């Protein structure tokens, strides 16, 4: 599968710097530096692992990039458990599956945190309608706020503890690109063969109930 065009964040301004095509041919292209911001460190680690990244700076960019991702992966029907995300799919002319998630071969969700050190994305049963890791569709679009990009797994757990004191997640999942070193070395890993898209949004663009 050809990679979705992505936009790397500028080290100086945090704004999109230039477009790139992500995929196997680009693995290892971006070398992380110790003093890079955590969002840039995450993007480099995530895309090196075969993840597909795009920055969205406006509602129009969210919808247009979503339509482009759906076209690229050949899907127009998505399981979207979180109601706050559904309008973006409707505006992109895509079909949303609500009742039976197993009818869809693609899904979308928000996340708890994106981890710069590992390039992993933390989600849980709160965002998957209770689906287990192995039940998740092989095509997954994840939406995240800029503020959700953190340095380490412990930072991600701290974010979960802070935002979900009353309703604790029962099962936390870490999504990674299919070319991530840990995924490739594992004999069995649900991330093998997964096409993972990560949409990074400025915080004010995110729905209140997601």
Image: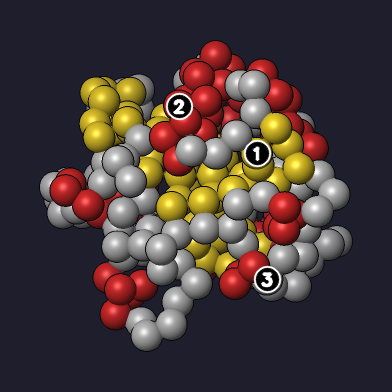
Q: Residue at label 3?
A: 132
Q: Residues within 10 Å of mark 1 (few under 14, many from 20)?
A: some
Q: Residue at x 51, y 51 (%)?
A: 139
Q: Which residue is rendered at x = 54% and y = 44% of the image?
A: 141
Relative to 38, say whether 84 is above or below. Answer: above
The picture quadrant where one finds residue 21 is top left
Element at label 3 = loop
Mark 3 Cα within 10 Å, few/some/many (few <14, many 20+)? few
| Depth check, front residue: 105 or 157 | 105
> Which callout, 1 or 3, points at the residue further toward the start of the chain?
1
Q: Residue furthest bottom?
A: 187
User: Which of pointers 3 and 2 indicates the residue nearer the eye?
Assistant: 2
Q: Quadrant of residue 164?
A: bottom right
Give the residue pinned by disc 2: 68
Residue 114 appears in the picture as rendered: no
How far separated are the C-alphas under marks 1 and 2?
A: 14 Å
Q: Which mark, residue 77? A: 1
Using the image, determine if residue 121 lies above or below residue 142.
below
- For marks 1 and 2, the one nearer the N-term is 2
Query: 2 or 127: which is nearer to us?
Result: 2
**Is the C-beta separation of discs 3 and 2 under 8 Å?**
no
Count of all numbered marks drawn on residues in the image:
3
**Is 201 on the left-hand or right-hand side of 92?**
left
Disc 2 is placed on an element classified as helix
22 left or right of 205 in image: left
The residue lying furthest to the top in this view is: 60
């Amino acid at each position: 599968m050809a990679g979705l065009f992505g936009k790397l964040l500028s080290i100086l301004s945090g704004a999109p710097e230039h477009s790139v095509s992500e995929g196997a041919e680009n693995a290892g292209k971006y070398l992380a530096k110790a003093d890079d911001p955590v969002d840039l460190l995450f993007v480099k680690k995530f895309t090196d692992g075969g993840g597909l990244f795009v920055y969205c700076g406006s509602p129009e960019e969210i919808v247009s990039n979503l339509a482009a991702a759906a076209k690229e992966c050949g899907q127009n029907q998505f399981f979207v458990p979180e109601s706050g995300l559904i309008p973006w799919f409707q505006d992109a002319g895509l079909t949303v599956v609500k009742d039976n998630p197993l009818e869809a071969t693609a899904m979308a969700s928000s996340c708890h945190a994106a981890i710069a050190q590992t390039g992993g994305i933390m989600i849980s049963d709160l965002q998957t309608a209770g689906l287990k890791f192995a039940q998740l569709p092989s095509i997954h679009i994840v939406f995240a706020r800029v503020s959700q990009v953190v340095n380490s797994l412990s930072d991600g757990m701290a974010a979960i503890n802070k935002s979900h004191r009353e309703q604790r997640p029962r099962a936390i999942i870490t999504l990674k690109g299919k070319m991530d070193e840990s995924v490739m070395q594992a004999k069995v890993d649900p991330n093998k063969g997964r096409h993972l898209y990560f949409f990074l949004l400025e915080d004010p663009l995110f729905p209140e109930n997601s």
